[in-house]
Amino acid sequence: MTIRLLLLALLAPAAVAAAEDYGPYRVSVVRVVDGDTIEVDVRLWPGLSARTSLRLAGVNTPERRGPECEVLAGAAAMRFTEAWLAGARGLTVSDVRPDKYGGRMLGRLRRADGADLARALLVAGHARLYYGQKRTAWCL
């Protein structure tokens, strides 16, 4: 009995922390802002949706401004995201939480086939892992 209580005490904080993330929600794409940010309409329930800016959790793509090499890489990342989303069906966003900068949400975007956009960007070389640390330059 004591071991069970100890396990429950250890697991309870993890359950509470996980409860802070939301989703999955069905979404439709309004526009691609850049490689890792998409404006989406989130279907909350029948007849109610909300438009928001969604930043992909766990990755960072080059910006579309700055040094020329970063602008070119940022444009390529954006084109990749647009192509990945083109004709996609059954898009969902999960693990949703507020972005540390405010005004955007962070989340994981997946297609009905289970493919994850952040992972696809990483595999294609258009993104780096990012968990809030200081960003490094794309141009060397």
Image (cartoon, grey):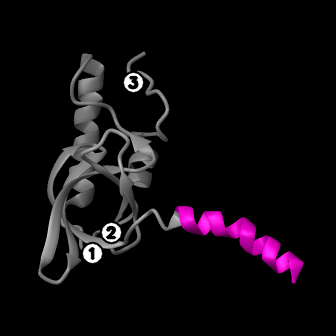
Local SS, label 3: loop
**Residue type, numbered disc 2:** Arg
Local SS, label 1: loop
List x then y, in percent, for residue 57. Answer: 41, 50
List x then y, in percent, for residue 116. Answer: 40, 61
Cα distance between the residues tagged 1 and 2: 6 Å
Give yes or no for contact between labels 3 and 2 (Cβ–Cβ under 8 Å).
no
Q: Is residue 56 magenta?
A: no
Local SS, label 2: loop
List x then y, in percent, for residue 8. Answer: 73, 74
Q: Foreground residue, 64 or 1?
A: 1
List x then y, in percent, for residue 84. Answer: 27, 57
**Residue type, numbered disc 3:** Trp
Q: Quarter of the image for the C terminus: give it.
A: top left
Q: Say which mark, if any, is on residue 138.
A: 3
Residue at the spot of label 2: 111
Give yes or no for contact between labels 1 and 2 (Cβ–Cβ under 8 Å).
yes
Give the magenta-colored segment's residue range: 1-17
